[in-house]
Image (cartoon, coloured by chain):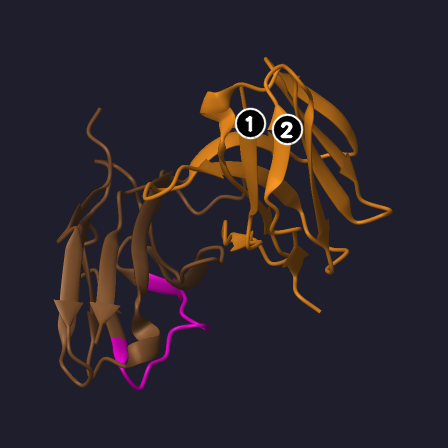
Amino acid sequence: EAGVAQSPRYKIIEKRQSVAFWCNPISGHATLYWYQQILGQGPKLLIQFQNNGVVDDSQLPKDRFSAERLKGVDSTLKIQPAKLEDSAVYLCASSLSAGVNEKLFFGSGTQLSVL
Amino acid sequence: QKEVEQNSGPLSVPEGAIASLNCTYSDRGSQSFFWYRQYSGKSPELIMSIYSNGDKEDGRFTAQLNKASQYVSLLIRDSQPSDSATYLCALTPPGGYNKLIFGAGTRLAVHP
């Protein structure tokens, strides 16, 4: 079974530039998550989709971050403009549903460095 | 107060010993609890889940939950160098939707 695919694996940009990350969840998984993991911290949920609708985006900095999952499959996360503090690993995860205790499967992540 | 608190470590144990990892949480209504293992540069991997008070064993791993004390722990028996990683405690807060809140993790080092 193919896992959660993410690209790019690494990205280096200068502050105030824009960047986009892509995620393809496991086939058939209705729920998709974007987490931000800053070095030395645990992952923090940015946004959760159920199919193509947003379930939770309470911790998404909406002035600079946006995310979409138009057809209920792939998702993109965008940052515009980037700040130094956005340097982190961006993890995409998926689960079969949003039911409590559904197992999350994580992708390999995109490591973003903002200079 | 952080929602999920863990000692950052490193916790250093000799090979073959028992490693004990601890986690406390602030919201009494938290529903489900998880332990993830994260190797350096890799993504988190679920190793244990526990939903009710008591112990749950899976191979060399035992998860313990005490909701009255708001405390979760993970015991790793017969620790191996391959167990060296960061262990993340996570929980589902009240309200569901499978939202996970993670602690900052405890780094475990198992030395031969």
Instruction: Find out whether residue B111 is within the magenta segment.
Output: no
Which image quadrant: the N terminus of chain B?
bottom right
Q: Secondary structure at mark 2?
A: strand
Few, some or many residues within 10 Å of mark 2 (<14, 14–19, 20+): some
Q: Which image quadrant is residue A43 in? A: bottom left
Q: Residue furthest front?
A: B112
Seen at 29% across and 79% down, the residue is A84
Specify the label residue B91 is tagged with: none
Q: Residue furthest right?
A: B68
Q: Nearer the viewer, residue B8 or A86?
A: B8
Seen at 51% across and 52% down, the residue is B100
Q: Secondary structure at mark 1?
A: strand
Instruction: Find out whether residue A60 is within the magenta segment.
Output: yes
Q: Which residues are magenta?
A: A54-65
Q: Can residue A60 be seen by looking at this rendering?
A: yes
The amino acid on which the numbered mark 2 sits, given as a three-letter code, is Val
Q: Which badge, 1 or 2, comes first in the chain's sequence?
A: 2
Q: Nearer the viewer, residue A67 or B95?
A: A67
Q: Where does residue A112 sit, x and y in percent of width and height?
A: 23, 63
What color was chain B assigned in the picture?
A: orange
Q: Nearer the viewer, residue B94 or A51?
A: B94
Q: Nearer the viewer, residue A18 or A56?
A: A18
Q: Specify whether A5 is left or right of B97.
A: left
Few, some or many residues within 10 Å of mark 1 (<14, 14–19, 20+): many
List the residue tagged with mark 2: B13
List the residue tagged with mark 1: B110
The amino acid on which the numbered mark 1 sits, given as a three-letter code, is Val
> To which chain does the residue with label 2 belong?
B
Q: Are marks 1 and 2 in contact (CB under 8 Å)?
A: yes
Q: Where does residue A100 sit, x and y in percent of width and height?
A: 54, 44
What color was chain A assigned in the picture?
A: brown
